[in-house]
Amino acid sequence: MLSIGEVGRIVQQLDQPVRLCVLLMYGGGLRLMECLTLRVKDVDVERREIVIRAGKGDKDRRVPLAVTAIGVLRRRFAELRRGWYRDYRTGVRSTGLTPALERKYPNASRDWLWSYLFPAARTFADPAGERRRHHLHETVVQRAVVAAGRAAGITKRVTCQAFRHSFATHLLESGADIRTIQELLGHSDVRTTMIYTHVMNRGALGVTSPADRL
């Protein structure tokens, strides 16, 4: 688990778009692939929330969008819109849509709202000959995060999953309810979430003893 200061030092070492990806993972407890497969329509800046579609266990959930990420996101949307328009004009489509969804929404793969928040730099031809653009590959983020951890002088093992763990632990430390954290993380069983109370060394219930206030 990383401290808040360590997360900040790592973020400072990162360039875009990996920096934004880390802000979203730490700010909302996202898994790496949940972050990379986000589409424009899944991020609601006005409501300050992100919708995770078909996460682990094929469940949707809502998580907070950090205020510190909003300015970066607005600039990101403007940049992506220009790239999407070039793709639209040249017939490039998004990936990751099921056949059923493509039948229901035939133009979704070319729709701005369905485009990836973290698109890959290159396109490819699918088996049908359609030119497609996938999302950023996970190894791009993983390698950048490891390198940023080294550059920041972090002696702990730094991985993308560490940001999700830190999100949960820091929420507990600030007094958040374990059931709320369970919902935000998308855990089906609260016992999975309870591990964070042990990480904090605060006992199985994740509370502070009243005797410690004497």
Image (spheres, helix red, strand yellow):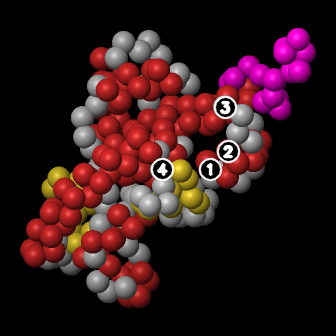
Q: CA distance from mark 2 to mark 3?
A: 12 Å
- Whichever of labels 2 and 3 marks the residue nearer the N terminus, that label is 3
- Per the image, the residue denoted by label 4 is 65
Q: Main secondary structure of the magenta part?
A: loop
Above or below: residue 55 compared with residue 15: below
- Mark 1 or mark 4, which has the lower sequence index? 4
Q: Amino acid at mark 1?
A: Leu
Q: CA distance from mark 1 to mark 3?
A: 15 Å
Residue type at mark 3: give it: Ser
Image x and y of residue 17, in percent: 27, 44
Q: What residue lies at 15% left-to-right and 63% top-to-bottom? A: 82
Kind of residue indicated by mark 2:
Ile
Q: Earlier in the sequence, mark 4 or mark 2?
A: 4
Q: Which residues are magenta?
A: 199-214
Which sits in the foreground, 98 or 41?
Answer: 41
Quadrant where the C terminus sits is top right
Confirm whether the magenta stretch covers residue 211: yes
Whether the residues at callouts 2 and 1 have beta carbons within 8 Å, the answer is yes
- The answer to whether residue 125 is seen in the rendering is no
Query: Position of 68 compared to 71: left or right?
Result: right
